[in-house]
Amino acid sequence: MAKSKRPDTKRIVNSKARFNYEILERFEAGIALVGTEVKSIRAGHASLDESFARIDRGEMFLYSCHIKPYEKGNQNNHEPLRPRKLLLHRREIHRLLTKVTQRGLTLVPLKIYFNQRGLAKVELALVKGKTHRDKREDIKKRDHERDMARAMGR
């Protein structure tokens, strides 16, 4: 049976990231996975809540990303919370390391998806934490826009 040309529509999204952080820059990275992790992600059994990326010894890793063990896997199934290596060019890692250390920013994954070639990718964001005041302003702005849309609909 031939593979389809379109990518899977399942995407694992970090829903809290946009609320808790101010996104400054986005970029795409590959992710090194084992076979049962790929199958589990394709089934939609993963969570990015409270996950983050960190640079250790010149390599970037994704921490606290929970990928549920594959149901039909055997005793060689993967560990759900193991650190996963992110694949970036050395220049990109060095550039991000300087921004993270000098400006106190954080690397947060926004989503995991499969590209056209069927490779697992992670959309990472360079973020700055929002204060409680910023979050309240966002809620007020969203409520105001919702009220405006309702009024226009009448």
Image (cartoon, rainbow, N blue to C red):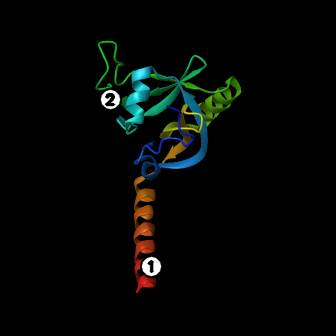
* Residue 11 occupies quadrant: top left
132 vs 59, nearest the viewer: 59
User: What is the three-letter code of the residue carrying label 2?
Assistant: Lys
- The spot of residue 21 in percent (x, y) is 48, 48
Label 2, label 1: how far apart the Cα atoms are: 41 Å
Residue drawn at point x = 39 percent, y = 21 percent: 82
Q: Earlier in the sequence, mark 2 or mark 1?
A: 2
Task: Quickly name the residue at label 2.
Answer: 68
Assess whether mark 1 and mark 2 are in contact (beta carbons under 8 angstroms): no
**Farthest residue, direction front:** 1
Which mark, residue 64? none
Q: Camera-side residue: 100 or 124?
A: 124
Labels 2, 1: front one: 2
- Residue with the most extreme right position: 91
SS at badge 1:
helix
Q: Residue at x 62, y 29 (%)?
A: 97
Work out whether 144 lies above or below 49.
Answer: below
Q: Residues within 10 Å of mark 2 (few under 14, many from 20)?
A: many
Q: Is residue 65 visible?
A: no
Q: Amino acid at mark 1?
A: Met
**Residue 122: x %, y % from top left:** 53, 36
The local crowd at label 1, few if under 14, some if 14 to 19, many if 20 or more residues have their Cα within 10 Å, is few
Query: Residue 148 shows which numbered tag?
Result: 1
Left of 22 or right of it: where is 70? left
Q: Residue at x 46, y 83 (%)?
A: 152
Q: Name the residue rendered at 55%, 41% in the picture.
A: 125
Looking at the rendered structure, the secondary structure element under dot 2 is loop
Residue 93's place in the image compared with 153, above or below, is above
Q: Is residue 139 visible from the viewing direction of this image?
A: yes
Quadrant, the C terminus: bottom left
Image-quadrant location for residue 136: bottom left
Q: Position of residue 50 (x, y in %)?
A: 38, 37
